Amino acid sequence: MSAHGILILFLVFFILKLGWGTGLSLLNLGHVHAHGMRVPPAFVGVVDEATYARSVSYTQTRGRFAVLSAGVSSIALLAVVLSGLFGIIEQAVRLLPIGSYLQGVALVGAVSLLFWIISLPFSLYATFGIEARFGFNRTTPKLYLFDTLKGFAVSAVIGIPVLLGLFWFMDRTGAYWWIWAFAAMTLFQLVMGILAPLVIAPLFNKFTPLPDGELKESILDLARRLDFRTRGIFVADSSKRSGHSNAYFTGLSRAKRIVLFDTLVSSHTKEEILAVLAHEIGHEKRNHVTKGIVLSALLSLAGFWVMSLLLPYLPLYEAFGFRAVSYAAMVVLVAFCSGPVLFFLQPLFSLWSRKHEYEADRFAVQSVGSARGMKEALLRLSRDNLSNLTPHPLYSFFYYSHPTLAERIAALDRAEAQLVKG
């Protein structure tokens, strides 16, 4: 296929992605508006009218902004491609008096910086405009700046060696470089899974051991009953950035750290927190984490294989303005082109993820002996986070990694009924 044909094919996928995504967003906004006058029947008595009105407004505001930002960003990205800017950047870095590998790092870094600049105004408005307007943002401009600089530093410390290693494998290990590169990348990701919570996460949040008391003892007792080994229970100071709540596990193998957002600890009951943690443990016990790692590895292997096939194909580079075959340009092209292509696989990933969420919810009910804690936790999280209670079914089917709140509550009730029946 010629360079012109490749560009046309890319534009078709790009426009289809933009059109389908925009259509789904507008469909969802219309559905929210149509149901925005009164609290949905499933939530009457548990969500008050004022909170529901705020959640509708928050959903509509974020949705409209997402449509606008996607449209403007898409125009900017198309301008980059059609103007030949990739080729201009490539020629500029080739003038740098450094080795070819470092020139490749410079190319990837320059393109990444360009895309970051394009997205920056939208990120700023989302944080200091929308999130602040609805009372969620607690990030100061100073903290935002420091987080950005630390993010750049972490990306450089990790990304530069990774890119240099990748270029070396592509250059020195022959036709099967993609297998060696995949193996090295997988090993690196496993190591980072261990080091990230210990080295990187503390750069952005302070993690304090959960104080001794009833909550800590109850969590440890739950972990013992479910044979879940933990290296400790920590509270993250997430409230200095956002009012949203969460809890998660970090680390690999059978020894993990339990991390609770301070907003979760301060606003949820012990029963709710235990249910949320039982849900997270359910992901581990139902092997969802292992399955996710395996799927990620398979997708990574497929990606490296595709790169190996496309690497020598000059028309592909020319279609996007590059002048010659290069390792760094291939990295840029894979990152740039994979989005429109993989976008239409999103429903499959979402469906798989929702299946796991249902399984983890059932595990939580079985573990704590009741659905009440999980239901109350989900309802409180929904109220506190102003979640959309009436997403359009097609929108949630395509995008949602978790079932809707109404679907989860109905499934929890069924799980509790089955538990009672024995």
Image (cartoon, grey):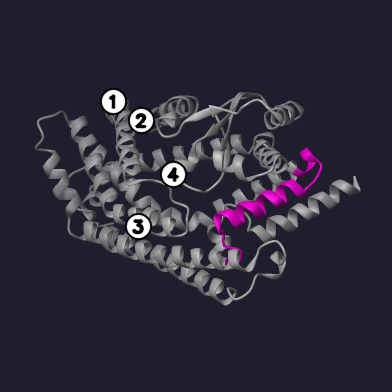
Q: Which residue is labeled 3 in the image?
A: 125
Q: Nearer the viewer, residue 235 or 391?
A: 235
- The Cα atoms of the two marked residues, 1 and 3, are separated by 45 Å
Q: For the C terminus, which image quadrant?
A: top right
Over which residues does the magenta segment extend? 365-391
Residue under pointer 2: 177
Where is residue 1 shown, x and y percent of the image?
A: 28, 57
Q: Amino acid at mark 4?
A: Arg
Three-letter code for the amino acid on which mark 1 is drawn: Arg
Q: Nearer the viewer, mark 3 or mark 2?
A: 3
Binning the other alpha carbons within 10 Å of mark 1 as few (below 14), some (14 to 19) or many (20 upward) gives few
Marked residue nearer the N-terminal end (4 or 2): 2
Q: Earlier in the sequence, mark 4 or mark 3?
A: 3
- Asked if labels 2 and 1 touch by Cβ distance under 8 angstroms, the answer is yes
- Specify whether residue 163 is in view: no
Q: Closer to the camera, 175 or 79?
A: 79
Which label's residue is closer to the chain start, 1 or 3? 3
Label 2: element kind: helix
Query: Disc 3 to disc 2, how far (Cα)?
Result: 43 Å
Type of secondary structure dominating the magenta stretch: helix
Please identify, in this view, whether the residue under mark 1 or under mark 3 is nearer the observer. Answer: 3
Circle nearer the viewer, 4 or 2: 4
